[in-house]
Image (cartoon, helix red, strand yellow):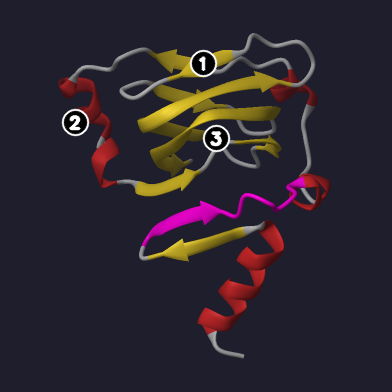
Amino acid sequence: MRTGAVLSFVFALLGCFYVGTTAFRLPTASFGARRAFTTTTMAAATAEIKVIAQADDATVAKLGCRRWATWGCGVSKFPWTYSDTETCLLIAGKVTVTPDGGGAAVTLQPGDIATFPAGMSCVWDVTEAIQKHYSFS
Protein backbone atom coordinates (compact mmCIF):
# COMPACT_ATOMS: atom_id res chain seq x y z
CA MET A 1 0.00 0.00 0.00
CA ARG A 2 1.39 3.43 -0.90
CA THR A 3 2.20 5.89 1.92
CA GLY A 4 -0.38 8.37 0.62
CA ALA A 5 -3.09 5.72 0.65
CA VAL A 6 -2.18 4.70 4.21
CA LEU A 7 -2.27 8.32 5.39
CA SER A 8 -5.61 8.87 3.67
CA PHE A 9 -7.01 5.79 5.40
CA VAL A 10 -5.72 6.91 8.82
CA PHE A 11 -7.06 10.44 8.41
CA ALA A 12 -10.41 9.08 7.25
CA LEU A 13 -10.58 7.09 10.49
CA LEU A 14 -9.81 10.25 12.47
CA GLY A 15 -12.24 12.35 10.45
CA CYS A 16 -9.46 14.54 9.01
CA PHE A 17 -8.02 15.26 5.61
CA TYR A 18 -4.92 17.11 4.43
CA VAL A 19 -4.51 19.77 1.77
CA GLY A 20 -0.81 20.48 1.38
CA THR A 21 0.48 20.66 4.95
CA THR A 22 -2.86 21.69 6.47
CA ALA A 23 -5.18 19.19 8.16
CA PHE A 24 -8.93 19.73 8.25
CA ARG A 25 -11.54 17.90 10.31
CA LEU A 26 -14.66 16.74 8.55
CA PRO A 27 -17.67 18.35 10.30
CA THR A 28 -19.64 15.12 10.68
CA ALA A 29 -16.82 12.97 12.09
CA SER A 30 -16.71 11.75 15.67
CA PHE A 31 -13.51 11.93 17.70
CA GLY A 32 -14.63 9.26 20.19
CA ALA A 33 -12.46 6.64 18.49
CA ARG A 34 -9.36 8.89 18.67
CA ARG A 35 -9.89 9.43 22.37
CA ALA A 36 -10.32 5.71 23.07
CA PHE A 37 -6.82 4.94 21.75
CA THR A 38 -5.03 7.63 23.78
CA THR A 39 -3.70 7.19 27.31
CA THR A 40 -3.91 9.78 30.08
CA THR A 41 -1.66 10.36 33.04
CA MET A 42 -3.04 11.57 36.38
CA ALA A 43 -0.46 14.37 36.59
CA ALA A 44 -1.61 15.83 33.28
CA ALA A 45 -5.26 15.60 34.26
CA THR A 46 -4.71 18.41 36.75
CA ALA A 47 -2.21 20.39 34.63
CA GLU A 48 -3.36 23.73 33.32
CA ILE A 49 -3.36 25.19 29.85
CA LYS A 50 -0.77 27.97 29.61
CA VAL A 51 -1.76 30.98 27.49
CA ILE A 52 0.15 34.00 26.23
CA ALA A 53 -2.70 36.34 25.27
CA GLN A 54 -2.06 38.45 22.18
CA ALA A 55 1.59 37.41 21.91
CA ASP A 56 3.87 40.12 20.56
CA ASP A 57 5.85 39.70 17.34
CA ALA A 58 9.12 39.14 19.24
CA THR A 59 7.63 36.17 21.16
CA VAL A 60 6.13 34.66 18.00
CA ALA A 61 9.48 35.06 16.19
CA LYS A 62 11.50 33.64 19.12
CA LEU A 63 9.30 30.51 19.24
CA GLY A 64 9.28 30.21 15.42
CA CYS A 65 5.48 29.78 15.39
CA ARG A 66 4.99 30.86 11.79
CA ARG A 67 7.26 28.02 10.59
CA TRP A 68 5.10 25.34 12.27
CA ALA A 69 2.52 23.23 10.47
CA THR A 70 -1.05 24.54 10.23
CA TRP A 71 -4.37 22.93 11.07
CA GLY A 72 -7.92 24.17 10.94
CA CYS A 73 -11.51 23.12 11.47
CA GLY A 74 -15.00 24.55 11.20
CA VAL A 75 -17.50 25.27 13.94
CA SER A 76 -17.75 22.09 16.01
CA LYS A 77 -17.41 20.56 19.47
CA PHE A 78 -15.26 17.50 20.11
CA PRO A 79 -13.21 15.73 22.81
CA TRP A 80 -9.43 15.55 22.51
CA THR A 81 -6.55 13.99 24.44
CA TYR A 82 -2.94 15.17 24.03
CA SER A 83 -0.40 12.35 23.80
CA ASP A 84 2.41 14.95 23.60
CA THR A 85 2.72 18.58 24.72
CA GLU A 86 1.38 20.92 22.03
CA THR A 87 2.07 24.62 21.63
CA CYS A 88 -0.04 26.52 19.13
CA LEU A 89 -0.57 30.03 17.79
CA LEU A 90 -4.18 30.74 16.85
CA ILE A 91 -4.25 32.68 13.57
CA ALA A 92 -8.01 32.77 12.90
CA GLY A 93 -11.30 32.02 14.67
CA LYS A 94 -12.32 31.43 18.26
CA VAL A 95 -12.30 28.32 20.48
CA THR A 96 -12.91 27.51 24.14
CA VAL A 97 -10.92 24.55 25.47
CA THR A 98 -12.20 22.97 28.69
CA PRO A 99 -9.97 20.41 30.44
CA ASP A 100 -11.66 17.30 31.86
CA GLY A 101 -11.53 17.02 35.63
CA GLY A 102 -12.33 20.61 36.52
CA GLY A 103 -9.38 22.56 35.10
CA ALA A 104 -9.87 26.18 34.05
CA ALA A 105 -11.38 26.66 30.58
CA VAL A 106 -9.56 29.02 28.22
CA THR A 107 -10.90 30.93 25.25
CA LEU A 108 -8.39 31.48 22.46
CA GLN A 109 -8.52 34.16 19.80
CA PRO A 110 -6.14 35.14 16.97
CA GLY A 111 -2.73 36.08 18.35
CA ASP A 112 -2.95 33.85 21.44
CA ILE A 113 -0.30 31.19 22.07
CA ALA A 114 -1.42 28.19 24.14
CA THR A 115 0.46 25.20 25.52
CA PHE A 116 -1.48 22.00 26.23
CA PRO A 117 0.28 19.44 28.48
CA ALA A 118 0.85 15.84 27.41
CA GLY A 119 -1.87 13.53 28.76
CA MET A 120 -4.50 16.25 29.14
CA SER A 121 -8.04 15.36 28.01
CA CYS A 122 -10.35 18.22 27.12
CA VAL A 123 -13.26 19.39 25.00
CA TRP A 124 -12.75 21.82 22.13
CA ASP A 125 -15.74 24.09 21.46
CA VAL A 126 -15.00 25.90 18.20
CA THR A 127 -17.42 28.82 17.86
CA GLU A 128 -15.72 30.44 14.83
CA ALA A 129 -13.77 28.37 12.26
CA ILE A 130 -10.15 28.21 13.38
CA GLN A 131 -6.69 28.05 11.84
CA LYS A 132 -3.59 27.54 13.96
CA HIS A 133 0.14 26.94 13.72
CA TYR A 134 1.14 24.05 16.01
CA SER A 135 4.15 22.14 17.27
CA PHE A 136 4.41 18.97 19.40
CA SER A 137 7.24 18.31 21.82
Query: Label 2 vs label 1: CA separation?
Result: 23 Å
Instruction: Identify the residue at horizontal 51%, vertical 16% (top origin).
Output: 107
Amino acid tagged 3? Thr
Report the disc number at residue 47: none
The residue carrying pointer 3 sits among few (fewer than 14), some (14 to 19) or many (20 or more) residues within 10 Å by Cα, namely: some
Relative image position of residue 95 (x, y in whole percent):
52, 25
Secondary structure mostly taken by the magenta-highlighted segment of the chain: loop
Residue placed under numbered mark 1 in the picture: 107
Relative image position of residue 122 (x, y in whole percent):
70, 27
Query: Label 2 vs label 3: CA separation?
Result: 20 Å
Dot 2 falls on a residue whose secondary structure is: helix
Residue placed under numbered mark 3 in the picture: 85
Dot 3 falls on a residue whose secondary structure is: loop
The residue carrying pointer 2 sits among few (fewer than 14), some (14 to 19) or many (20 or more) residues within 10 Å by Cα, namely: few
Query: Label 1 vs label 3: CA separation?
Result: 18 Å
Instruction: Identify the residue at horizontal 62%, vertical 33% (top origin).
Output: 118
Residue placed under numbered mark 2 in the picture: 61
* Pointer 2 or 3: first along the chain: 2
Amino acid tagged 2? Ala
Dot 1 falls on a residue whose secondary structure is: strand
Q: Is residue 124 magenta?
A: no
Is 45 positioned to the left or the right of 112 in the image?
Answer: right
Disc 1 + disc 3, Cβ < 8 Å: no
Q: Give the range drawn in magenta.
A: 21-31
